[in-house]
Image (cartoon, helix red, strand yellow):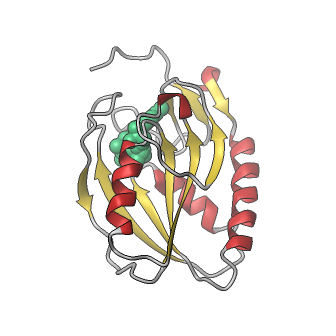
Amino acid sequence: MEGNVLITAEEIERRVKELAEEISRDYQDKEPLLVCVLKGGVIFLADLVRHLTIPVNMDFMAVSSYGQSTVTSGQVRILKDLDTSIEGRHVLLVEDIVDTGLTLSYLCDILLARDPASLKVCTLLDKAARRRVKVPVDYVGFEVPNVFLVGYGLDYRERYRELPYIARLEAEPEEE
Ligand code: PRP
Ligand code: 7HP
């Protein structure tokens, strides 16, 4: 995969630090709840929080839209809900990638119905060319082209999440 690197580990680290500085400024004295979307978002969250200079809480949600495929089914299922109530909380949703926007749109609807004090979205990668629904994204690490990516949390059939960089998947598979 090393020949297909799109974003290096050093570039990711630099950008994650910048995002953390921005978030720390914006959420001063708000003790936000960072909601991470498993599994892909976990690597980004883990690096992001270690550069924050404010206290935060964390909780996790798991949803599934892609299954074993590289194309979205358009259907989102909750596999694991939050442990905590978000009513009155400043919630920051942390994602690895926004692609069609279907997952995020569904998640925002669910979370907004629970009356948070605010809801914002932070994504490491934004594949805007593939967007099918309009979704608000407040913090973006990198805009990425319309190719299938792996690494730094992103998988293809549960592989490659552990790569420290983001790469284009070699021999992109046929759509299923
Ligand atoms: C990926 C990613 C986002 C979603 C984005 O999750 O982490 O949650 O797809 O795609 P969309 O904007 O087209 O909805 P996936 O369902 O692959 O689960 P994973 O994080 O466990 O790999
Ligand atoms: C989901 C996803 N997972 C891995 N690589 C990509 O490029 C992706 N887009 N949406």
Is 121 above or below relative to 102? below
Q: Quadrant of ligand 1?
A: top left
Q: Residue at x 32, y 63 (%)?
A: 110
Q: Can you give x and y, in whole percent of width and height, for residue 88 in the image?
A: 45, 83
Quarter of the image that includes the C terminus: top left
Closer to the camera in the image, 131 or 142: 131
State the residue lying farthest toward the front.
134
Which image quadrant for residue 143?
top right
Q: Is residue 55 left or right of residue 120?
A: right
Q: Is residue 97 left or right of residue 165?
A: left
Q: Can you give x and y, in whole percent of width and height, for residue 116 in the image?
A: 43, 76
Is 154 above or below relative to 56? above
Q: Residue at x 55, y 77 (%)?
A: 32
Quarter of the image that includes the N terminus: top right
Is 28 above or below relative to 174? below
Q: Can you give x and y, in whole percent of width and height, for residue 134 in the image?
A: 46, 43
Q: Is residue 139 left or right of residue 78?
A: right
Closer to the camera in the image, 174 or 113: 113
Q: Residue at x 51, y 48 (%)?
A: 96
Q: Can you give x and y, in whole percent of width and height, for residue 145 in the image?
A: 59, 26
Q: Residue at x 63, y 49 (%)?
A: 140
How many numbered discs?
0
